[in-house]
């Protein structure tokens, strides 16, 4: 949400407002899915957690195996911290027109695939395909990667059914 004009215009901000929910945003611009995140799970009560990693990992050429293993450890740590609470994993979002491999020769789709493979079947883990949340069209992005306010609105609209379904199960 770094390019939204207001925090309430981010996809999560819009979803939280629609659900009348509080949000604790622990995002850090430029962050990657570091292995140490599994050791730093917030000590707080939550109803649902959403994780959206992969774009910066792709940009930095992080190997997909390490990326997937770090995701698995983080999701397992979150589930251990709050058993029965849903963890939503959003795979990397659409890159408008972005099909170029990274410096390691990997494609962004490989980062999406490894998340789906590594986390499939984990109870309380819900995979959301990020490239289905925003259309592949530059008008929804500031720079082809970061959604603008209109892109955030589409992202929120497409994420809401998942949130409602997951929240209903808890």
Image (cartoon, rainbow, N blue to C red):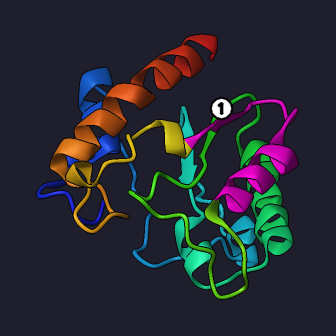
Magenta range is 109-129
Q: Nearer the viewer, residue 90 or 45?
A: 90
Q: Is residue 75 depicted above or below 70 in this figure? A: above
Q: Residue furthest top?
A: 168
Q: Does residue 138 appear to the left or right of 103 in the view shown?
A: left
Q: Residue furthest left?
A: 5
Please report the residue visible at 68 percent of the width from the left and 53 percent of the height from the top.
112
Please report the residue visible at 86 percent of the width from the left and 50 percent of the height from the top.
118
Please report the residue visible at 74 percent of the width from the left and 60 percent of the height from the top.
110
Q: Is residue 45 visible?
A: no
Please report the residue visible at 80 percent of the width from the left and 55 percent of the height from the top.
114
Q: Nearer the viewer, residue 170 or 62?
A: 62
Q: Is residue 47 depicted above or below 59 in this figure? A: above
> Residue 33, percent across and down?
65, 70
> Residue 51, percent across and down?
57, 51
Quadrant for the N terminus in the image: bottom left
- SS class of the residue under badge 1? loop
> Mark 1 = which residue?
86
Magenta stretch containing residue 119, yes or no? yes
């Amino acid at each position: 949400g770094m390019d939204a004009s207001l925090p309430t215009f981010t996809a999560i901000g819009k979803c939280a407002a629609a659900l009348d929910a509080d949000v604790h945003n622990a995002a850090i611009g430029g962050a990657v899915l570091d292995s140490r995140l599994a050791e730093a799970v917030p000590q707080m009560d939550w109803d649902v957690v959403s994780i959206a990693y992969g774009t910066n990992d792709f940009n930095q050429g992080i190997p997909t195996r390490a990326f997937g293993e770090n995701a698995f450890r983080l999701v397992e740590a979150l589930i251990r911290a709050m058993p029965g609470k849903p963890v939503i994993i959003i795979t990397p979002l659409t890159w408008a027109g972005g099909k170029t491999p990274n410096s390691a020769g990997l494609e962004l789709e490989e980062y999406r695939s490894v998340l789906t493979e590594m986390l499939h079947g984990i109870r309380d883990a819900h995979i959301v395909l990020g490239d289905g949340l925003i259309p592949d069209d530059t008008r929804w992005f500031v720079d082809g990667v970061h959604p603008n306010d209109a892109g955030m609105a589409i992202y929120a609209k497409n994420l809401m059914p998942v949130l409602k379904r997951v929240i209903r199960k808890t």
